[in-house]
Amino acid sequence: MKAKITLIPGDGIGPEIVREAKRVLESIAKKYDHEFIFTDIDMGGCSIDKYGVPLTDEAIEIAKNSDAILLGAVGGNVGNSKWYNVAPNLRPEAGLLKIRKELGLFANLRPALLYKELAGACPLKTEISEAGFDMVIVRELTGGLYFGERYTKEVDGIKTAVDTLVYNENEIRRVAKVAFDIATKRRKKVISVDKANVLDSSRLWRSVVEEVAKDYPDVTLEHMLVDNAAMQLVMNPGQFDVMLTENMFGDILSDEASMITGSIGMLPSASLNESKLGLYEPSHGSAPDIAGKNIANPLATILSASMLLKYSLGLDKETSDIENAVEKVLKNNFRTADIYTQGMQKLSTSQMGDKVLEYLK
Ligand code: NAD
Ligand code: IPM
Ligand code: MN
């Protein structure tokens, strides 16, 4: 197969982890006789430095004209980077929000599973980590607080900031369908997370999700309030199969879910629309604290590349090859610093890439 893949290395550790994922894709192409044509574009702080904006129209055109997009991460040290005190649409993160919106990537899939080998890196009690868990968070990605009106102004001489949270029933319905479709191929359970005891948007969310559930008689639906969900995730993560939630709640809960898999460096993601063109990225950020040190964990990005092969290119065998290689690396006790436990062999970012390549062959 011939496919055009847009690479967005971005900022911080982005270029280091995308480099490893690209090597993995190249190795897959060689093994299966595919032709992957890679084009790099700038997004985030690096684009601001070059062009004055976090994502140029030319870059977005290249992304739109490809078959899939792989992103590292964007952004600097929030609060004290040169990109902080500027208008919202000129910040690094605005590039990411723009590409999500322009491509209509409303469904963000974040699979969180605990590899048996990483039970020791899971911060939960032994009986919980040994029981294991395997869930997919389906996060709505183009609505809610991220895309509502926002401004800061003086009201009666007092500085006041406003962010608005808007959802319409169509936005809720389409992402709920994605969650139920995924559940039918898994353990057939959706837990929808909201704050229906307070928010109107959550009450609408709940009623639309219930409507959608009627078309999926084999799938059980449960509702859970977001504060309870945060607690349940560390008390009994095994109860979650598909977790469906809105944009901001999903952002927060997926970081929590990532940590119980051992590290945020393990959690991949796919951002999908109704067509095949998706954007794939680790759930973590640009990690400015460890950038340039060759110690970041590239596995979340490598696993995001494997999701790319599955969802955008339909290459299931190639996808499981990468997943199996990652599993073998862990089974053979190779770890980056973030998932390191005593007795394991500590690897750098590039050495971890080497190991995945070795087990791919
Ligand atoms: P972060 O995820 O970048 O880092 C949080 C912590 O996790 C840090 O200690 C970091 O060193 C560690 N970490 C993250 N990824 C790792 C990896 N692969 N291996 C080992 N350790 C890893 O979150 P943050 O510090 O809150 O944000 C930093 C910047 O990233 C901000 O500018 C933020 O806006 C941006 N961000 C971007 C994305 C994205 O591009 N998709 C996602 C989240 C945050
Ligand atoms: C993520 C990130 C982004 C988000 C930021 C960088 C805008 O945290 O992909 O999880 O909140 O969606
Ligand atoms: Mn996040």
Image: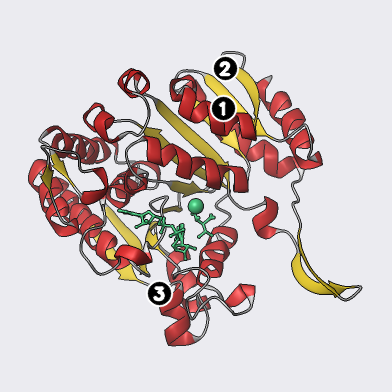
- Mark toward the start of the polypeptide (2 vs 3): 3
Relative to 121, residue 274 above or below? below
Say whether residue 153 is visible. Answer: yes
Q: Is mark 3 within 8 Å of ligand 1?
A: no
**Mark identifier at residue 219:** 2
Q: Nearer the viewer, residue 117 or 168?
A: 117
258 over 46 or under it: above or below: above
User: Relative to residue 111, is residue 293 drawn left or right?
Assistant: left
Disc 3, SS: loop
Name the residue at 40% across, 78% down.
46
Disc number placed over residue 180 in the picture, else none: 1
In-image side of 15 versus 253 (left or right): left
Cα gap from disc 2 to disc 3, whole angstroms: 42 Å
Q: Are marks 2 and 1 in contact (CB under 8 Å)?
A: yes
In three-dimensional space, the C-alpha distance between marks 2 and 1, rounded to whole angstroms, equals 7 Å
Q: Which residue is mark 3?
A: 42
The three-letter code of the residue at mark 2 reads Val
In this orientation, which residue lies closer to the viewer: 29 or 345? 345
The amino acid at mark 1 is Phe
Q: Quadrant of the C terminus?
A: top left
Q: Quadrant of residue 186?
A: top left
Residue lying at 11% horizontally and 53% vertically, measured from the top left: 354
> Where in the figure is residue 128, as x and y percent of width and height?
37, 21
